[in-house]
Image: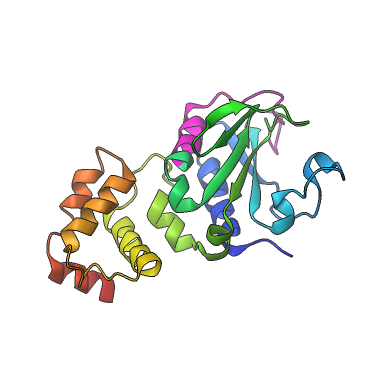
Amino acid sequence: MSEKPGTRALQNWLLAAIGEIPGVISVDSGIYVYRHIDNDPNKPLSVHSYGRALDAGVREDLPGYPNGKWPTSKIESPELDALIERLIERHEQLGIDYMIYAGRQWRPGSGWRAYRGTSPHNDHIHLEQTPAAARTLTAADITAILGDSTTTGSDTDPMAYLIYFINRTYEQYGRDPRKDPEGVDYWIQRAADEHQNQVWTPKLVSASPSLQLMTELLDS
């Protein structure tokens, strides 16, 4: 086995985004490694063994530490916290189904809970993807979902996300929004609802009000 392309694409985006945060240095702590959870042979294989778990390392950018200082507790960074929450907000689109960071673990439907594994994960964000996302997600998909990794606080480009959403709808349901009886505006609103961003949503709803414009965008 080896690392999955979707997991590598998300790792690359995340490392670039972390690297833009003041006071924080990103480190690629790896994706694929064949081992059991907690290196205990009596426990199941880690998702790293299947190539769909990533470790995005974080270090404190401090004087005297050219490669960053290894954190012994959670790095206090509002920007880093916001980035993690941004990943969680988009977890369905990104296929994220588990995360560990700084003594806490997150799962869809459960939210954040205490993590009591052998490592508190202060020095890296551990993130796992579904098999489908790990296999198929591309760098272009991730940029459409999350925006430019070099501008971590910016909104996703509405039209890029809309095109991603429409294409994904066609792949998942076999329905072409350009020809769907519901109408293209219905699918635009569905994309807006999924994004759940009150500032961004009006931009999306007004981004492509006509079927002709949508057809031109998807055919370009």
In this orientation, which residue lies closer to the viewer: 63 or 59?
Answer: 59
Would residue 220 be visible to someone looking at this image? no
Q: At 74% across and 31% down in the image, what residue appears?
A: 117
Position of residue 20 measured from the top left corner of the image (x, y, whole percent):
50, 41
Would you say 194 lies left or right of 120 here? left
54 part of magenta stretch: no
Q: What are the residue bounds of the magenta stretch?
A: 61-86
Q: Main secondary structure of the magenta part?
A: loop
Q: Quadrant of residue 27?
A: top right
Q: How many marks?
A: 0
Q: At 49% across and 36% down in the image, what residue appears?
A: 109
Residue reaching furthest to the bottom: 219
Q: At 81% across and 43% down in the image, what residue appears?
A: 43
Would you say 136 lies left or right of 189 here? right
Would you say 155 lies left or right of 2 here? left
User: The C terminus lies in which quarter of the figure?
Assistant: bottom left
Would you say 170 lies left or right of 48 here? left
Position of residue 50 measured from the top left corner of the image (x, y, whole percent):
70, 58
Would residue 121 be visible to someone looking at this image? yes
79 part of magenta stretch: yes
Q: At 34% across and 49% down in the image, what residue appears?
A: 156
In this orientation, which residue lies closer to the viewer: 197 or 62?
Answer: 197
Q: Compared to 136, does 188 lie above or below?
A: above
Color scheme of the displayed model: rainbow
